[in-house]
Every structure is written in structure tokens, then in C-alpha cells.
Image: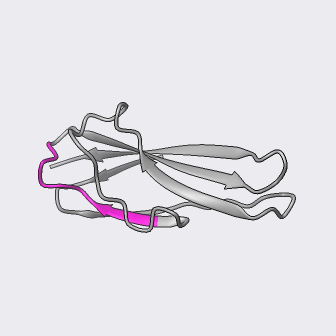
Amino acid sequence: MDLKGKVGETIQLNGLAQDPDGDDLTFLWWQYLEAGTLQGYVQLRDKNSPQTFFVIPDKARIGDTIHLILQVEDNGSPSLTRYQRVIVEVVG
């Protein structure tokens, strides 16, 4: 999924997951710093929830990308993990 946002804009992210076995799920949003071009981290709120948000920082430049990962893990045995990447591009 690709999103666009301006400096100072709040970006809302909504994840959705369910386990076919009915196992409990844990959610974790994190920034894949090495893949993006933004210099530094964004501050994710509620990063252990299916929904999170962050503000594009003042130091962001037009054309920068912010790569975020939603990691969902079940509590089954063996435990299974799924990842989804979201890319946010800074626009003017």
C-alpha cells in the first residue's frame, strides 16, 4: 500500500488480520528505516494496535519515503508471523 502526505500531516494506518484457527493475534507497527529515505524515525502512536498514526516530521523533504511494517503474530504452536509494508511518500 502506498500513501502520500505533507510535512506536518497526520497519517492514519489501519491494519486488519484474523486467524483461521481462532488464535489470539499480536500486532506491532515498526519503521523499516533502511528501506526509506527519510533521515530518522517517525513517532508511531499505539504501535501495538491494529491502528496507529504518526505525523510526518518537519525534517522530511519532498520525495522522501517512509516505510512502515505491520507485523502480526499468532499464539499458535508453531507461532506464525505475517508482514505487510506500507510506504508513505512525502509530497508538497
Residue 37: x, y in percent? 26, 34
- The answer to whether 78 appears left or right of 48 in the picture is right
Q: Residue at x 84, y 57 (%)?
A: 20
Residue 33: x, y in percent? 34, 38
- The answer to whether 12 appears left or right of 29 in the picture is left
- The answer to whether 42 appears left or right of 31 in the picture is left
Residue reaching furthest top?
Answer: 34
Given residues 33 and 62, the one toward you in this image is 33
Rendered position, 61 above or below 13: above
Residue 69: x, y in percent? 49, 46
Q: Which residue range is magenta in the image? A: 52-61
Q: Residue at x 59, y 44 (%)?
A: 83
Q: Residue at x 14, y 49 (%)?
A: 92
The stretch drawn in magenta includes residue 80? no
The stretch drawn in magenta includes residue 55? yes
Dividing the picture into quarters, in which one does residue 36 lie? top left
Dividing the picture into quarters, in which one does residue 19 lie? bottom right
Given residues 55 and 29, the one toward you in this image is 29
